[in-house]
Amino acid sequence: MNGSVDGAWPVPFRFGGRLCLDFVNTVNSRSRPATRDYLPDWAALAGWCRQTALFEADVMARLEKTGLHDGEGATAAHREAVAFREALYGLFKALIDNEAVPGVSLSALNESLRAARDRQVLADAGRRFDWRWDASRLDLAAPVHAVALSASAMLSQDDLGRLKECPGPDGCGWLFFDETRNGSRRWCSMDHCGGAAKARRYAARHAG
């Protein structure tokens, strides 16, 4: 999804085009000193899961209830989610910059992928089979597992030449997947950073 989201949700914008990129973009911003972390605690992380329709409503209700009654577990799960977010950012940024992928980032992704697959079952979907969550096995780490699957799909199936970042210093540094026909997208959004940069350039040209 690209565009604005209802301000009642934890993250006001989702411009990434891939779930894993939207997850990485829950810090504002990446190219300048961060002014806000949109996922400051487990409750916000759960809200983001609802915002992105990551799991069925009954699953989310159970996870939220667990987080409410297990404060230490929720705190640990949130801390691990933030660490995973930064590991993914390091991995994706290395790809964009044509640098070697940090081994620690790839290891973190593989570890989460193994845990995610352990919580899925192969289900008959009629003339084909789909991987589906075994809801009974989902725990407070479920958001990380779902994001890991999204990252795996993007890394193994998409044209990574279309993985880009909103350029600094005018842009926010958020990551996005360019799905334009000719691969010409430059900004996270023209309404967000592109338009502001254009206005600043216009003002500079007409100063004085």
Image (cartoon, rainbow, N blue to C red):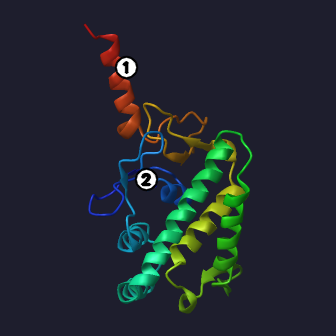
First in residue order: circle 1 vs circle 2:
2
Q: Kindly identify which residue carries mark 1.
A: 201
Q: Quadrant of the C terminus?
A: top left
Residue 77 appears left or right of 70: right
Give the residue at x 46% y 55%: 1
Rendering coords of residue 65 (x, y %): 37, 88
Give the residue at x 70% y 53%: 102
Q: Residue furthest top?
A: 208
Rendering coords of residue 45 (x, y %): 41, 70
When the figure is inspected, residue 165 is found, relative to residue 101, above or below; the finding is above
Residue 95 appears left or right of 10: right
Give the residue at x 37% y 64%: 40
When the figure is inspected, residue 28 is found, relative to residue 81, above or below; the finding is above
The crowding category of the residue bearing disc 2, from other C-alpha atoms within 10 Å (few below 14, some 14 to 19, many at least 20), is: many
Q: Kindly identify which residue carries mark 2.
A: 27
Can residue 60 be seen from the camera position used here? no
